[in-house]
């Protein structure tokens, strides 16, 4: 669903009764549930015992706050902002440290006809994984939002509470560093 039709869908359903709000929530669950869970996994330590509880709390918070969503703006940054804030509040309340190594999963296209292409794809994925694990948590989050969620700089800035130029600069530096590493430089 493209951004304009998504905004329209959210706008129409957010103004409706409980049944329609439930349908809208089902839309969010189906389209964003796995992404939200993955995003939580990058903020909390691996195998954290409260990860599932946090996911449920965040989904409930999204449902209860659907009426506050302004359909003039995209839905995705609004969802990620709620998710990030809820996780950070949890961490502050538990005085836990943010996980220092965000695990990314790479979906590579299987090319059984050409093992050489597959080898290079796997090598590139491994290099990107190594690169992302070496990033600080803030840059890792920016990297994820930009390259896995394809968010615009403006929306990343809103989620991260950063100036758009800071986001652009960090992304540019990460691209240069990754390009250097992939080409064999250290």
Image (cartoon, helix red, strand yellow):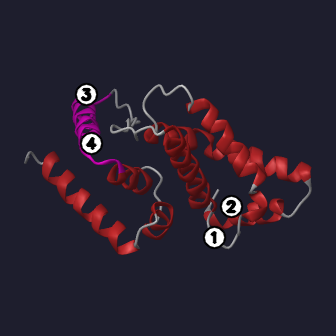
User: What residue is shown with label 3?
Assistant: 115
Residue 36 as seen in the image, left or right of residue 147: right
Residue nearer the viewer, 118 or 87: 87
| Residue 145 seen anywhere in this rendered image of the structure | yes
Marks 1 and 3 close (CB-CB < 8 Å): no
Residue annotated with mark 4: 128
Badge 1: residue crowd in 10 Å (few <14, some 14–19, many ≥20): few
Residue 120 magenta-highlighted: yes
Q: CA distance from mark 1 to mark 2?
A: 10 Å
Q: Which residues are magenta?
A: 113-137
Q: Position of residue 33 (x, y in %)?
A: 63, 41
Q: List x then y, in percent, for residue 160.
A: 45, 61
Mark 3 / mark 4, whichever is N-terminal: 3
Please tell me the numbered disc located at residue 73. Answer: 1
Q: Which residue is mark 2?
A: 6
Instruction: Check if residue 129 falls in the magenta segment.
Output: yes
The kind of secondary structure element at disc 4 is: helix
Mark 1 or 4: the one toward you: 1
Q: Nearer the viewer, residue 5 or 44?
A: 44
């Amino acid at each position: 669903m493209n951004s304009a039709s998504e905004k329209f869908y959210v706008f129409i359903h957010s103004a409706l009764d409980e049944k329609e709000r439930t349908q809208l929530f089902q839309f969010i669950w189906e389209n964003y549930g796995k992404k939200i869970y993955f995003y939580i996994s990058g903020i909390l330590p691996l195998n954290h015992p409260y990860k599932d509880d946090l996911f449920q709390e965040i989904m409930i918070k999204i449902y209860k706050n659907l009426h506050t969503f302004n359909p003039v703006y995209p839905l995705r940054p609004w969802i990620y902002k709620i998710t990030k804030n809820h996780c950070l509040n949890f961490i502050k309340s538990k005085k836990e440290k943010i996980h220092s190594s965000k695990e990314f999963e790479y979906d590579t296209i299987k090319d059984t006809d050409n093992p050489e292409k597959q080898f290079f794809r796997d090598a590139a994925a491994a290099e990107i994984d190594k690169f992302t694990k070496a990033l600080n948590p803030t840059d890792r989050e920016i990297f994820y939002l930009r390259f896995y969620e394809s968010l615009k700089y403006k929306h990343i800035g809103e989620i991260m509470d950063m100036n758009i130029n800071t986001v652009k600069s960090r992304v540019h530096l990460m691209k240069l560093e990754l390009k250097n590493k992939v080409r064999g430089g250290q």
